């Protein structure tokens, strides 16, 4: 399960362009890792395999991409509703029947949407789900980068076992 303990109270943000580039590099490392993964069912956490971890990251990346695309195009985002633990598990289950390649393709598609829209000056504040506080785009980019890196480190450790 995802309990990464990320710091949600950031200060001294770097420029959005720098944060997006850092996220691009992290996303590329994630894609490379999963493209070369010999066995997607290796356990990473008690209830999640490597593929489940990718599904979790993809679920949240797609949500972020939808929200950003909505805001850039003048639409009200349709925020996720529910407890974080429930959303995490529902996201994994929603992608469970897809192949690893299909989940990876969806991650890449969501990331492309973020790349197109993240630097748009119309983006100011956003939420990741109903009930969350508002985050600057810079905060959100850094949080997403940290989240992916956290799970990528754990998946790499699991592969070495």
Image (tube, rainbow, N blue to C red):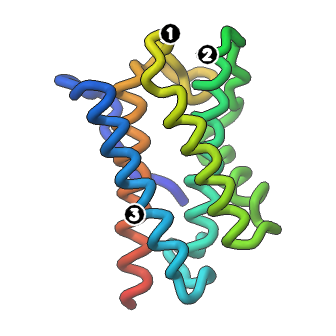
Residue 138: image quadrant is top left
Residue 2 higher or lower than 124, as above or below = below
Q: Badge 1: how crowded within 10 Å, few (<14), some, or many (20+)?
A: few
Q: Is residue 16 left or right of residue 115?
A: left
Residue 23 to residue 152: above or below: above
Q: Are marks 1 and 2 in contact (CB under 8 Å)?
A: yes
Q: Can you see residue 3? A: yes
User: Is residue 47 visible to the viewer in this orientation of the structure?
Assistant: no
The x and y percentages for residue 154 are 39, 70
Label 2 neighbour load within 10 Å: few <14, some 14-19, many 20+: some
Marked residue nearer the N-terminal end (1 or 3): 3
Whether the residues at callouts 2 and 3 have beta carbons within 8 Å, the answer is no
| Residue picked out by circle 3 | 29
Residue 10 spot, x, y in % from top left? 26, 28
Q: Which residue is mark 2?
A: 71
Would you name the residue on which mark 1 appears? 122
Mark 1 falls on what kind of element?
loop
Q: Earlier in the sequence, mark 2 or mark 3?
A: 3
Which residue is at a point 71% across and 30% down the rendered structure image?
81
- State the quadrant of the N terminus: bottom right
Identify the residue at horizontal 76%, vertical 66% (top origin).
96
């Amino acid at each position: 399960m995802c309990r990464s303990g990320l710091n949600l109270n950031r200060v001294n943000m770097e420029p959005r362009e720098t944060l997006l580039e850092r996220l691009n590099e992290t996303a590329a490392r994630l894609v490379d890792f999963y493209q070369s993964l010999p066995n997607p069912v290796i356990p990473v956490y008690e209830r999640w395999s490597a593929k489940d971890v990718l599904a979790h990251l993809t679920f949240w990346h797609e949500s972020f991409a939808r929200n950003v695309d909505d805001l850039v195009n003048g639409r009200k985002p349709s925020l996720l509703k529910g407890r974080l633990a429930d959303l995490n598990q529902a996201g994994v289950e929603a992608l469970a029947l897809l192949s690893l390649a299909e989940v990876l393709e969806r991650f890449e598609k969501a990331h492309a949407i973020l790349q197109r829209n993240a630097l748009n000056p119309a983006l100011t504040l956003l939420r990741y789900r109903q009930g969350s506080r508002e985050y600057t785009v810079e905060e959100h980019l850094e949080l997403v980068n940290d989240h992916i890196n956290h799970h990528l480190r754990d998946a790499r450790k699991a592969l070495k076992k």
